[in-house]
Structure formats: C-alpha cells, structure tokens
Image (tube, rainbow, N blue to C red):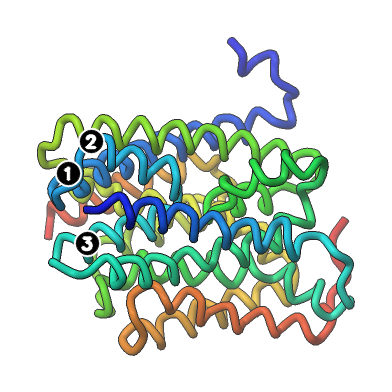
Amino acid sequence: MSWTLIIALGVGCYLFKVLGLVVIGARSLPPVMERCLALIPAALLSALIVRDVFSVGQDLVLDARAAGAAVAVVATWRKAPIPIVIMLASAVTAVVRAAA
Amino acid sequence: MALQRLDPDLRPVATASIAVGVVIGAFGAVFGVTAVAAGGSVLQACAMSALVFTGASQFSAVSVVADGGSTAAALSSALLLGARNGVYGLTMARVLDGKLVRRLGAAQLVIDETTAMATAQTTRREQIAAFWMTGVTLYLCWLLGTLGGALIGSEIDPKRWGLDVALPAAFIAMVWPQFRTHNGRLAGLIGAVVCLVTIPFVPVGMSILCAAVAVLVGIRPDPEPEPA
C-alpha cells in the first residue's frame, strides 16, 4: 500500500463531499430539482440496504442476512429504537447462520 | 450522565449514534486488520481512515491492493464509490449552513450514516444535531476501530455475530421516515430494484449510483400532502 494511494484517495473523496455540500451546496434550485434532491436518501439508502442484504460482490444471494433484515423491518415498523433494531437483526442473522 | 442533561428530543439520536458508532468501530477494526494484511502499516491504515473516512472506498482500495492491483486501479474504483458522498452533500446542504470553515469541516463527515441519521429527523434543529453527533461519534469510532484492528491484526469474524447485517438494519430504521410520502416510497422501491438489477452487470459499488436514477420520481409533485 502506497502513501500516494492514501493521500490521493483522501483528497479525491473529500473533494466529492465538498463538491456536493459546499460548491453546489444550498443554492436555490428550481422546485423540480428540489423535489428530486429530497428523494436522494430514500433512493440511495434503499439501494444500500438491498445491496448489503442480497449480494456478495457481483452475485445476488439469499442467505441468513435476509432473515435479519426482515426482523429489522418488523422491529422498525413496531417503532423499536435503532439500537434494538441493530441488535435483533444481528442476533437473528447469527442464529440462522449458525443453524444453517 | 451527559445523556440525561441532553434535550429530551435529542436523546434517542444520541443513543442511536452511539449504537451505530459501536457497529462502525467493529467495521473499523475489520478494516484495520484487512489493511495490515494487504501490506499496509498501522500508520497507513489509520491515515486512510482519518483522511478518506468512507468505509466502502477504503475496503475497495485495500482489496484491489491485496489482489496485486495497481495504485491507479485501486484509486479509480474507490473514487467511484466515494462519488455518492457528493450526492449526499447536495441533500445535506439543505440542512447544514453557517460559516464556510464550518461547512468545509462538515464535508468530511458527509457519508451514508450521517445523511441517513440526519434525514430521519423531523425538525431542522434535530437534523443538524443528528448530523454532528453521528458524524463526530462515527469518526472517532472508525479511527479507534482501525487502530485497534491494525494493532491486533488477528482474525475478527463479524459474520459470526451477524454484524454484517448491523449496518443495513440501521439503514432500514433510518430510511423508514422517508417512506411517509408517496414519492419517498416510490423512489425507495425503484432505487432498490435498480440496484438489484444492476449488481451483476456493473463494477462493485456502482449499482448504488445507478439507483440514483430513482430520484426522477420527484419530477411529478407528491400526490399526497406532506404530513406535518
């Protein structure tokens, strides 16, 4: 691992963050764009969730993680606080994985 | 207890950020172990966590290096993964303001978890508090976890404890409030489907950026009135 990689990646990733937050930032945009921007968390977080639960690299898989995620959905729907959601989902995944 | 002196409205945010911090600390340890196994020094592992502070990009870079890939190859895929923080920055710019120096500092903390935690709150004050609490907690936990993992260097198996689901589970809880509106639900559904469909065909991590196409749902105004 080279320092070039570490520093270039640090600078590059920081520039992306600054580009969104500061450079483009909070300028007022047409209402259509504002409505689209407001949907970024819904779209990207949903994508992250299904990626983390249903894939390994480029393969789609169905394994113990699906059981844990299902429990997380039910716990969230029942208004459980985030720490409880995390613990229940992890525990169920561990148990299902151990049993399989 | 500092937690009891805190505004009651902010207590759930504080406990949630600590819980997510513990999970991130564990992932940081895994990263530390992985980075040292890929030939990095303890200092390099910690420097990467401090400078880059984006788990997905760091894991991607280190795995390319471990596979014998070039610096250019490691850099390009890791940067692609880091691009989504720019998109989150657009969202967070609606919440965070103040002096330029403050925003330049905040920028380093704009990642999946902080955006998710902030947007899960209802009032702007709670959103700002959630962003900073989660950001600072995660930064410290990620760095300490990396240091611990790099020093121990032994095998940690997060899967044994089901910890590989800890993060998506937290994301499920955090994204939930986004589904209050019709457009939010539709964007979430389309984002998830696009991601799943593209996973086998695009480089690892790019499927998340592909899912951003779902924000076009917002071209049409939400048919339901926003709940107060």
Locate residue B77: give its quadrant.
Answer: bottom left
Give the image location of residue B111, x and y in percent: 54, 53
- Describe the element under mark 2 as helix, strand or loop: helix
Q: Earlier in the sequence, mark 1 or mark 2?
A: 1
Chain to which mark 1 belongs: B
Quick one: which residue is furthest to the top in this view? B1
Q: Amino acid at mark 3?
A: Ser
Give the image location of residue B47, x and y in percent: 36, 40
Q: Is residue B188 left or right of residue B226?
A: left
Please say whether residue B83 is visible from this viewpoint: yes
- How crowded is the residue under tag 1: few (<14 C-alpha within 10 Å), some, or many (20+)? many
Q: Are marks 1 and 2 in contact (CB under 8 Å)?
A: yes
Name which residue lies at 73% across and 71% down.
Answer: A37
Q: Earlier in the sequence, mark 3 or mark 2?
A: 2
Give the image location of residue B63, x and y in percent: 22, 61
Give the residue at mark 1. B36
Name which residue lies at 67% across and 79% down.
Answer: B215
Locate residue B228: give its quadrant.
Answer: bottom right
Q: Is residue B163 left or right of residue B150?
A: right
Quick one: which residue is furthest to the front in this view? A4
Q: Is residue A53 left or right of residue A74?
A: left
Distance (Cα) linking label 3 and label 2: 16 Å
Q: Earlier in the sequence, mark 1 or mark 3?
A: 1
Is residue B221 or residue B137 the one in the foreground? B137
Locate residue B70: give its quadrant.
Answer: bottom left
Give the residue at mark 2. B42
Is residue A33 or residue B35 the one in the foreground? B35
Give the residue at mark 3. B63
Q: Amino acid at mark 1?
A: Val
Name which residue lies at 73% across and 25% down.
Answer: B8
The residue mark sitting in front, 3 or 2, is: 2
